[in-house]
């Protein structure tokens, strides 16, 4: 069945370090892919998205490229800040249909130390 | 716009009690969903709706009921709460083909 797998956390980095959080998916068809972020005590916010192969989503210095050949959507940031500390979720639609259902990875906790 | 609102923020129930988690959105979105978030498991889809009067089951529907009488509201009902339903519940809404917008969540504890 369709699934999303993220790297295990927690990830602890020093400020200004480079961040990569791996995400791979299995899906039929051509899913849309998302990264959501959850700050402590809050709901999920969309960070970035990509809807077709080779698309690059970007926002707030974060980037992720939709790689169909490796079924991956890894999240990267060149220089993290303390304010980036949060839980990051990779998500996929069920196949090509973006109609109210998402599959989420288990989430990766990022802690950035000053 | 208030976006997606959920009430209550916190709730404690005893085993066997019933309750309704409320969800409302003011963005005129057709699609709404309920998820539960458990440690190490991400978010799992409970029920979803593609429009008023139309609902369907997600990955973990057992123990939960939903209805969608209006576009704006999508309540989630627990008929007989169990400790396994202790979780954080998120409601979300979207337009067809776009991203989902999430509410702030309801933290439920079942004793």
Image: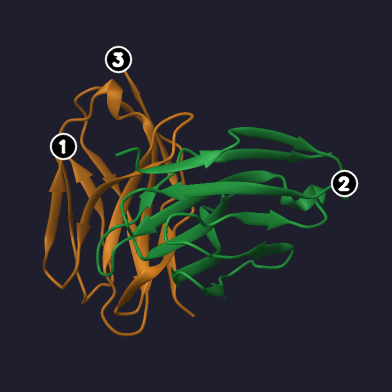
Query: Which chain does the residue under circle 2 lie in?
Result: B
Q: Which residue is mark 2?
A: B15
Location of residue A92 in the rendering, given as x and y in whole percent from the top left corner:
35, 66
Count of number-bearing discs: 3
Instruction: Give the colour chain B carries in the figure.
Output: green
Residue at 83% x, 55% y is B80
Residue found farthest to the front: B70
Q: Which residue is mark 1?
A: A60
Q: Which residue is mark 3?
A: A114
| A18 on left or right of A96 | left
Query: Which chain does the residue under circle 1 lie in?
Result: A
Q: Find numbered disc 3 in the image and state the secondary structure of the residue it sits on.
A: loop
How many angstroms separate mark 1 from mark 3 (CA)? 19 Å
Give the number of the mark in front: 3 or 2.
Answer: 2
Location of residue A6 in the rendering, given as x and y in whole percent from the top left corner:
41, 56
Mark 2 residue crowding within 10 angstroms, few (<14) / some (14–19) / many (20+): some
| A102 on left or right of A19 | right
Instruction: Give the colour chain A carries in the figure.
Output: orange
Q: Nearer the viewer, residue A110 or A38?
A: A38
| B87 on left or right of B3 | right
Location of residue A46 in the rendering, given as x and y in whole percent from the top left corner:
29, 47
Give the number of the mark in front: 1 or 2.
Answer: 2
Mark 3 residue crowding within 10 angstroms, few (<14) / some (14–19) / many (20+): few
């Amino acid at each position: 069945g369709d699934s999303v797998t993220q790297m295990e956390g927690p990830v602890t980095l020093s400020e200004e370090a480079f961040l990569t959080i791996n995400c791979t998916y299995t899906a039929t068809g051509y899913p849309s892919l998302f990264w959501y972020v959850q700050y402590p005590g809050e709901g999920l916010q969309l960070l970035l998205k990509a809807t077709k192969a080779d698309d690059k989503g970007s926002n707030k210095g974060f980037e992720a490229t939709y790689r169909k050949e490796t079924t991956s959507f890894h999240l990267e940031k060149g220089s993290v800040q303390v304010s980036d500390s949060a839980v990051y979720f990779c998500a996929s639609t069920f196949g090509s249909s973006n109609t109210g259902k998402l599959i989420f990875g288990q989430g990766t906790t990022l802690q950035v130390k000053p | 716009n208030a976006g997606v609102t959920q009430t209550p923020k916190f709730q404690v129930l005893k085993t066997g009690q019933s309750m309704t988690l409320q969800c409302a959105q003011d963005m005129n979105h057709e699609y709404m969903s309920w998820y539960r978030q458990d440690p190490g498991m991400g978010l799992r889809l409970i029920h979803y709706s593609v429009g008023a009067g139309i609902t369907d089951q997600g990955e973990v529907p057992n123990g939960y009921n939903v209805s969608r009488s209006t576009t704006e509201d999508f309540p989630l009902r627990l008929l007989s709460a169990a400790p396994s339903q202790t979780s954080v519940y998120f409601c979300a809404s979207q337009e067809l083909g776009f991203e989902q917008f999430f509410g702030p969540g309801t933290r439920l504890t079942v004793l």
